[in-house]
Image (tube, helix red, strand yellow):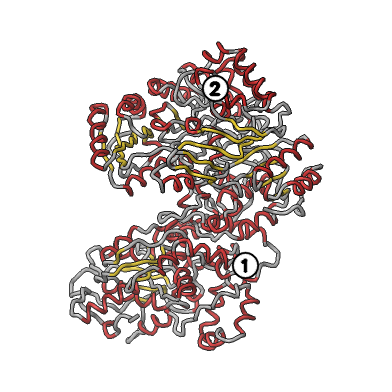
Amino acid sequence: MADLTKTRGTPDGTRELARELADAVRGEVSLAAGDRALMTMDASNYRRVPRAVVAPRDAEDVAAALRVCREHGVPVVPRGGGTSIAGQATGVGVVLDFTRHLRRIVSLDAEAGTAVVQPGVILDDLRAAAGAHGLTFGPDPSTHSRCTLGGMIGNNSCGSHSVAWGTTADSVRALEVLTYGGERLRAGRGAAALDALPQRLRDGVRALVNGDLALLRTGYPELPRRISGYALDALLPEKGTDLARALTGSEGTLGVLTEATVALVRPPAAKVLAVLGYADESAAAEAAHTLLPYRPLTVEGMAADLVGDATGLPKGGAWLFVEMGGGTPAEALARAEELCRGAGAATTDHTVVTDPARQRALWRVREDAAGTATRMPDGSEAWPGWEDCAVPPERLGAYLRDFRALLAQHGLRGTPYGHFGDGCIHVRIDFDLLTAPGIRRFREFSHDLGDLVVAHGGSLSGEHGDGQARAELLPKMYGGELVGLFERFKDLWDPAGGLNPGMLVRPDRMDENLRFAPLPRKPVDVEFGYPHDSGDFSAAVRRCVGVAKCRNSAPSTSAVMCPSFRATGEEQHSTRGRARLLHEMLAGEVITDGWRSEEVRDALDLCLSCKGCRSDCPVGVDMATYKAEFLHHHYAGRLRPAAHYSMGRLPRWLRAAAPVAPLLNALARTPLAGAGKRLGGIAPQRAIPELATEPFVRWWSKRMAPKGPGRPEGATRSAGPTGAAGAPERPALLLWPDTFTNYLAPEVGRAAVHVLEAAGLDVRLPAAGRRRASLCCGLTYVSTGQLDQARAVMRRTVDALDPLLADGTPLTVLEPSCAAALRTDLPELLSDDPRAARVAASVRTFAQTLEEQAPAWQPPRVDHPAVGQTHCHQHAVLGEAAEQRLRARAGLDGGLSGGCCGLAGNFGFERGHYDVSVACAEEQLLPSVRGAAPGTEVLADGFSCRTQIDQLTGRRARHLAEVLAEGMAAEAARGTDGSLPEGPSAEEPPPQP
């Protein structure tokens, strides 16, 4: 977090406030535009700009911050993970960020089944700690990997297991709270807890309850997901006078939580997932409540318009995900099968999933729905606003039919899904929140839907709270008299109105403070085409809706995003944080320098351009592209960092260095290397990779030197075997001589040629000559934002490649980062050239080429365990399924590491990035390599990954092509070579390791 010296753009009168805060608290205090910009939004449609951000270290810091704010008359907003969908985690005063320091599990009593936690504890961290004792925390919203316990208590969060374990309120036992006025109290259960309150509060609460007993007993609907409003009925004597329950779900408007005692549950030892298919959404909704007598752990629903490709799901147009538990796997399976039989003829099909990996894959579809639902099938935007209303479960089918009819009446579209067993529906709707007519329709629809929910006996909020999104409509649900009690309760706890004003009680209008209001109304001038956002950079940035999957701090073997956040833990280094800064850059209110913004530049500096968010973010935010775009504009007409010249233009330098490679390699081992690294902006800890003394293209040219006149025009062609006379011509491919393979790892290219030829393929390269020497995918220029040069390089590449690929010849690329650049950056930067899309569509990886062009070829059996790294660009853009299948056929057992190696092209070589680069590698990759048994193959198709492994472990990692070429040589030596009959190139054996 920035310091107080960075006060540009700070509201008048705030510097004195900040100085006093800095003197009073031990945690960080910031007025910096970047820090404030990170807090303007949560996961809702709303945006409010805070005056300052405070990260308190303990409860004493919270008390001190409240005192200073109270003296200045400044409101306070407590904030956890910022995943709230109703706007309650945004604020105009001082934001208290609990995620930095107050994230300790104070104690865990396994025997009593309770835990004491600070408000910034991440739910998954609590679940992991409880799991060591066979326990868990029952509520589990889809944001479990990044939401905080404080936020869950503030919103009364629920999750998919609420049919079994209820809401957060059902798990809260006691709360340590500070009021805006400075009173400290412990909110618990029972009359004794009420007696322990300060007298003002004790007398006020009793007077409020005793004065309106009848209203409190009759004014609340009975349903499992009633989250809206204050739970004043919990204060009734027959409900145990539960003050902790009454404060849960109050959205930070009554007090600031500093510690909570929560109950834990013991989940069943075994779980089985039954997926039931139904003809349509209504059928699934009608059936959901009939499954509750089977005592399921979950009853989650979604329809085909959300799932899209229903791979792994049974036949149907909608599905219920029903999890059943048991003491043993057999018992859980028996209970799931009993449920499926009981579901009977209402279903179209069903499947029972016992494999934990398959269960996790299916649950990911459900958990990502909060993001995927933000885009309609045609790519248009959809937004929250009616994200979580709930009705009695037995009325869900009827409600959904009426809901769909109301959507049609207003000309809107939405994709409902959610907690069908509890009658709670999530939906994102294609509201137009950019124009005045669209906003009016949003408001009119909201009022009509509020009436519809109430008519079905429902709650305006069934999970995420009212905030600003729905609080305006609370009189529809509760009537004016009960809402008046809410206001009296608020005034009792917060008479100065200093805690989260504008939320829940006396709320701002639902169509005020919309986050889109300050964005430019016309597309800004940009370089990339942004094809999925109609060329509009603002629309691309709007993709981030704040679900914050990028803030997952736990490493994953199946995901990459977001390595820099996991290394630093800083919001500005998450994909969401960077998107928020770009949003504020476009808005121009907090960040006022546009493309010249230092705040955005500094946040993007630690973006590895790994492209992980392109695939792992549920809404497809592509921060690597946004970074390249920003750097292009930021440095336009200005001196760039030295690394942009040294590594951003690497293809040019490597081409010039090739003739004197031995001399440069020798110099790299002398003290002169240090001066060269300083000049080039390279981290001093990094060794300079050795240059190839014979580049791959030179080897190829010598190998292909014609023994007679002439050679094919436009491409040089393999002299490999052509098969028997009269046999069909060998399938051709164009092998891309990327910069890394050509000048730094030619052994990879040589090995690939031998394997591809052995598989019966006709390998070609773009024709030799001066023009070919300048061909490049443009990767290094793109990653450093030198987009004019990237475009010029790419134009030459398209000119050369398009004629050679016109007949459908695949373009095989050995370096994953170059393949990803050709597949995505090329057509998006040359969006005006249809040839670029054709070239991109032709790109194949080494394994994809073998699978598609030589399906009958059998790779050599290597039969070794394998560790290593899946290149992050391959994960994000190209996929690794073909590589996994090829490794399995070759007997290379074991999965490769997820995440990112941390080198990421130029990133890990740049001065100032070394520590983060190493931290990324230490997350998964390096421990797996160090822990590998003797004889384990270390695989990494990316040059960066191989270099990182070599420099940080001393182990040599190899491209899959190298391992297969070695295996072919071993089989040939044993007389078991499975290749085709040898031809003219057979005099050259496959390369040895």
User: In x, y percent, where is residue 418?
Assistant: 42, 33
The kind of secondary structure element at disc 1 is loop
Observer-nearest residue: 77 or 68? 68
Total marks placed: 2
Looking at the image, residue 649 lies above or below residue 111: below
Q: In which quadrant of the rendered view does residue 882 lie?
A: bottom left
Q: Is residue 829 left or right of residue 714?
A: right
Q: Is residue 474 left or right of residue 697?
A: right
User: In x, y percent, where is residue 4?
Assistant: 75, 52
Residue at 54% over, 78% down: 688
**Is any part of residue 194 visible from this angle?**
yes
Q: In which quadrant of the rendered view does residue 232 lie?
A: top right
Residue at 72% over, 50% down: 32
Q: CA distance from mark 1 to mark 2?
A: 57 Å
Q: Quadrant of the C terminus?
A: bottom left
Residue 814, numbered circle: none
User: In x, y percent, where is residue 660?
Assistant: 53, 87
The kind of secondary structure element at disc 2 is loop
Q: Is residue 581 left or right of residue 974?
A: right
Residue 912, numbered circle: 1
Looking at the image, residue 140 lies above or below residue 693: above
Looking at the image, residue 983 lies above or below residue 171: below
Mark 1 or mark 2, earlier in chain: 2
**Is any part of residue 759 visible from this angle?**
no
Q: Residues within 10 Å of mark 2 (few under 14, many from 20)?
A: many
The amino acid pointed to by label 2 is: Thr
Residue at 27% over, 30% down: 347
User: In x, y percent, where is residue 689?
Assistant: 51, 78
Residue 241, numbered circle: 2
Q: Residues within 10 Å of mark 1 (few under 14, many from 20)?
A: some
Q: Nearer the viewer, mark 1 or mark 2?
A: 2
Q: Is residue 573 left or right of residue 825?
A: right
